[in-house]
Image: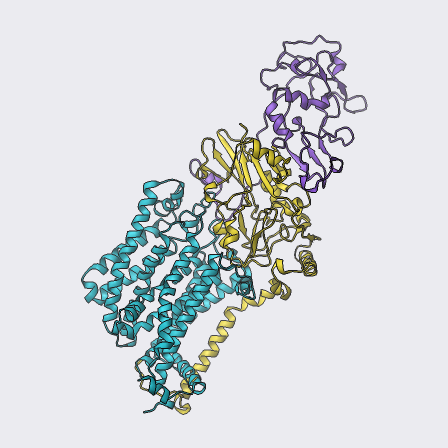
Chain colours: A purple, B cyan, C yellow
Amino acid sequence: MTVRLAFAPSAFNAESGSATIGRGSNIARVSDASPAEFFPVVINRPEGPPRLRLDAPDALGRPVTVACSTCHTIREPNIENRSTIDLDEFHQGLSVLHGELACLACHNPGDYDTLRLADGRAIEFSNVMTLCAQCHGPQWTDYQRGAHGGMSGHWDLTRGGRVRNNCIDCHDPHAPAFPMMQPTFKPRDRFLAPAHSREGGGHG
Amino acid sequence: MSQASTHEHRPQHWMSYPRFLSRSLGLATDGSFGFYAWMTCLTAVFLVGANAWANQVVQGMVVTNMTDHVSWGLYIANFTFMVGVAAGGVMMVIPAYLYHDKQMHDVVILGELLAVAAIVMCLMFVTADLGRPDRFWHLIPGIGRFNFPISMLTWDVIVLNGYLLLNLHICGYLLYTRFLGLTPNPRWYVPFVFVSIVWAISIHTVTAFLYAGLGGRPFWNTALLAPRFLASAFVSGPAFIILSMFALRKLARVPLPDGPVHTLVKIIRITILINLFMLASELFTEFYSGGAHTSSARYLYFGLHGFNGLVPWAWSAIVLNVIAAALFLTPAAMTRMSVVTIACALAFIGVWIEKGMGLIIPGFIPSTLHEIVEYTPSLVEWKVTAGIWAFGLMIYTIALKITIPIFSGRVRDLARDPE
Amino acid sequence: MGERKSISLPVLGQVSRRTAMKGVGATLGAGAFAAAISPLRRIDEKVTAEEFMQRHYKELSDSDKRDVFTRLEAQAQDEYGADVSISDPRPIPGTLFVYAINLSLCNGNGKCVEACHRENNHDRATNQSYIRVLEMPIGTMDMEQGNTTYDHPVPAEGKFYMPVQCQQCQEPPCVDVCPVEATWQEDDGIVVVDYNWCIGCRYCEAACPYHARRFNWKKPEIPADEVNPDQGFLSNRIRPEGVVEKCHFCLHRTRNGRLPACLEACPTGARVFGNILDPDSDVRWIMENKRVYVLKEELGTAPSFFYFFDS
């Protein structure tokens, strides 16, 4: 049986997902508003541990998902494992292109429904950004100051809230390089020669 | 005639001025078969242009081939050139009034009338270039909002209209007094003539500053632009005046002396060399130093990244100007009308290209983001341009048609003639 | 012109034939001229009397503005079949907008270009947008090596991407050159255009060193269901033909505290926007902690638009 890993959707959860980041980021000095008057900055986050979808549906045709711990509580963790090549039952075809990390660098062998920080402490999947930040300090710093990571909503928190992406909204944790994209919207100015009709390095 | 006699026969202007106007209208519309044929042709071309412009207004500037990359085209190119022609007339005024050249003094009105026609053409070219000619009134000080003195374009509005008014006044005053058979009172026109000398320099300087002040357009952003504008204006203006004097002699058999032609040839001998020298200075600076700021010049003269639409224009201008310079410098330029004619025609066309396709267009190529979008005028642009040229020539023809009989004394206000 | 000395008043009997011919000629000429410019009869379809008489934005009273907005809303309904609402948000006191782009993150996908196109009611046929993205080889800042028409998957090997839009210069050359004050800088740094005052001379387009200005060569075409109904008078309302327009930092959004459309659309999170006067703002932190640069700094335009790379 082949099983693919599916992450829980990083759905915006207004109740549990709210978080204020940084040192009172975006305090609108001019209005001299007290922090109580600020709308929240909400960071997308996974609702909980991911569930794995099995290929075969149940008797009623509904998809079957299982918790990580369903299988992993009865299996010996393999600390050495760095890729899915050696796996013959689950997680086949999952490409792992995240430096030299082994699976258990981030997954917690003690409780597969949580993640593990470098110091061995367990951490909830919903707090995955803390895990990422261990190694990606500069990105985390930038993120806290809005210099990394997409957002929508308001620049002025006295007038409205803001929703921010989680690391894993844009970066697949197993292959975090940002994917290639095909530009779909190009200028169509009159008389501007399209790229392919140009010589060499292309001017235009 | 002395001041005293002017007072003796103090004209009744409310009577004589309408007579002057009506006689002018008569002169403007009477003529030979050749005159009617010429005016009919010009009218036809003008109507084609008027129609093209009306369509442009209704359909939008999309009927031109201008783009956000090359946002000024044939209209502004011709505008720039015609400012030069208008300013060039001053090369007759200076010898006539500063050096008291008697023969030049007799024909100097040709230059002043040319200035009138050329400025009218300038105003028409600018209007043709406006995306919203219906909002023209926004430019009128008092009614609109006139961004003076910050915008060089407002300076240009002032100097061009001022120059038009100056020359209209000078020509109108001289014509009217001659019509009355009086000696013009220097008080009423000589100060204006001296103002107009400075003003002529100013119109082309301001027009050059229009471009030279744009830091984002390195091709124009050179201190040499205004001097070059003037030097080339003092080629194209006198060249056109020589050509029109020859045409008047040949076609209308107006007896014009050789002296002014010789003076103008002498002037062009200098100005065309100064212009070529400044061109050489620019080319040296551009090509010896190189770098991103010289890419417009590279595009203009040699093509850039496979785009070379202006290269034939640029080299034509250089070849025309060099041949014209060589011809002007030969002794034959003083003796043989054919040599002067050819030299003037070559120089006129050469400067037209240099100031138009060779100056305005490459300022936009490559664009400020170094994109290359080429420009060839559309049919509508050519039609409108031809129409404005036809209209300018009509004005000049009619002005000459009125002026020559009055200045030669053949037409006078007999109703109050003391004789 | 060898005519004999004549007198000022034409003697009717002698020249009546010629005078009659002149009359015929003048009539024909006038008729032909009227026919030639007859397309102008359609001008009233384009310019109504109210529109023609409309004063400059700064001279409009609040009630004038209400009338103008109502008229423009009706016009949008009439010409585009779209139910729009036009507002006029004013600068927020104590706000100076700054934009910063992280070029280490930008991958040139062009979503910002498209978002601008949709947000700002640009002409559909030309893919008009206030943003152009240059693909440049790593190792140079020379825009001459750049290219905006690349259409391969991005980021391409050895390239970086630089979006360019209005830099909202603090010394804007485009504002200086405008002969009719149709464009000016507002207190929050945004350079705006009164589309009902611009005469379309395009001097500003020549003056801008960043290719930030666009001219409406024709009337924009937008399907009714694609018209963005949230419109600002000085920003994204459907522009009339024959006038210049430019990026206005989405002032109909940003002056209500919202982020610009191009920023929200950016899938790489490369764009940062905020109030530089707020010492705790993101843009302020970037200015203080990143090595930022501006385009064509040597021109002295003092852009409010900054670029930076991750170290």
Q: Is residue C296 visible?
A: no
Q: Nearer the viewer, residue C43 or B325?
A: B325
Q: Nearer the viewer, residue B392 or B102?
A: B102
In the picture shown, does residue A12 fall above or below A130? below
* Residue lying at 63% horizontally and 60% vertically, measured from the top left: C59
- Given the current orientation, which residue lies at the most extreme right position? A60
Q: Nearer the viewer, residue B186 or A131?
A: B186
Q: Position of residue C245 (x, y in %)?
A: 57, 51
* Residue lying at 43% horizontally and 53% vertically, measured from the top left: B211
Numbered disc total: 0
In the picture shown, does residue C301 fall above or below B323? above
Write down the quadrant of residue A127 in the picture: top right
Q: Position of residue A4 (x, y in %)?
A: 69, 20
- Given the current orientation, which residue lies at the most extreme top position? A76
Q: Nearer the viewer, residue B31 or B81?
A: B81
Drawn side of residue A200 relative to residue B145, left or right: left
Q: Is residue B309 visible?
A: yes
Drawn side of residue B143 relative to residue B301, left or right: right
Q: Position of residue C294 (x, y in %)?
A: 51, 39
Write down the quadrant of residue C272 in the picture: top right
Drawn side of residue B175 relative to residue C151, left or right: left
In the picture shown, does residue A114 fall above or below C17? above
Q: Position of residue C291 (x, y in %)?
A: 53, 32
The quadrant in which the N terminus of chain A is found is: top right
In the picture shown, does residue C121 fall above or below A139? below
